Image: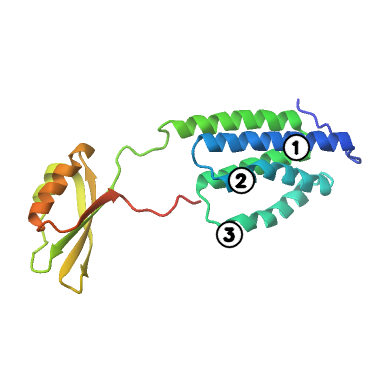
Amino acid sequence: MFTSILTKDVIGIQQALICMLVSIVLGMVISIIYMYTGICSKNFAITLTLLPVLVQMVIMLVNGNLGTGVAILGAFGLVRFRSIPGSSKEILGVFFAMAVGLATGTGLIAFAALCTVIIGFVFFALNKTSFGETRVQERDLKITIPENLEYAGLFDEIFATYTTKHYLESVKTTNLGSMFELRYKITMKNKADEKKMIDEIRVRNGNLTIMCGRQATQKDVL
């Protein structure tokens, strides 16, 4: 069983210092994990390092009343999410650090350390593997053609050779209406054949601009 090092009514200086030290150390561990996964900026690393000790201070200030402490931290937590749109991993890091701070703020030092080690290991392992990745990646293909070229079915033969799926998503005029920009969604049979496909498209569109890349999506947010 995990027991708290804090007494209910009075918090000693030594106990408070131990909790603060553990909070900072565990915050640094979380930051190091995020830095090794390559998704952590310096500002975010500092945030993850200091957030547990700040949460711990709030919990101690409300005398262990967890409900009041969470309500206060929720109000402060809005500052980050209102200022910078975070990815799901960044939001996870913030809640990770907050959870550690909640544990140390109630004196559950051993529980906080154990959770940091287990969750950190699982996060690191999942991030370094292909867990959750889609095997088929849809791509954006933009093709510029002259205005006098009939685009309906123009590239179907090429797509049938190199893609498993394709469809025309949009058509718009460009260059003062003298050209069309066709935007396709495609799924390649073999990524290594991308250059061959583009070369064949160049022959049909008069060597005008072609752009092929990963499907543009919004940042992964919750």
The kind of residue on which mark 2 rests is Val
Q: Earlier in the sequence, mark 1 or mark 3?
A: 3
Residue 53 visible in the current orientation: yes
Residue at figure coordinates x 61%, y 55% from the top left: 80
In the displayed structure, 196 sits above or below 217; it is above
Residue at figure coordinates x 12%, y 69% from the top left: 147
Does residue 11 appear left or right of residue 143 in this picture?
A: right
Please name whichever residue, 135 or 192, is drawn nearer the observer in this view of the structure. 192
Circle 3 packing at 10 Å, graded few (<14), some (14-19), many (20+), is few
Could you tell me residue 37's position as x and y percent?
50, 36
What numbered label is drawn on residue 83? 3
Residue 95 visible in the current orientation: no
Residue indicated by mark 2: 94
Q: Secondary structure at mark 2?
A: helix
Q: Nearer the viewer, mark 2 or mark 3?
A: 3
Residue indicated by mark 1: 104
Per the model, the C-alpha gap separating discs 2 and 1 is 16 Å
Could you tell me residue 143's position as x and y percent?
19, 57
Does residue 25 appear left or right of residue 37 in this picture?
A: right
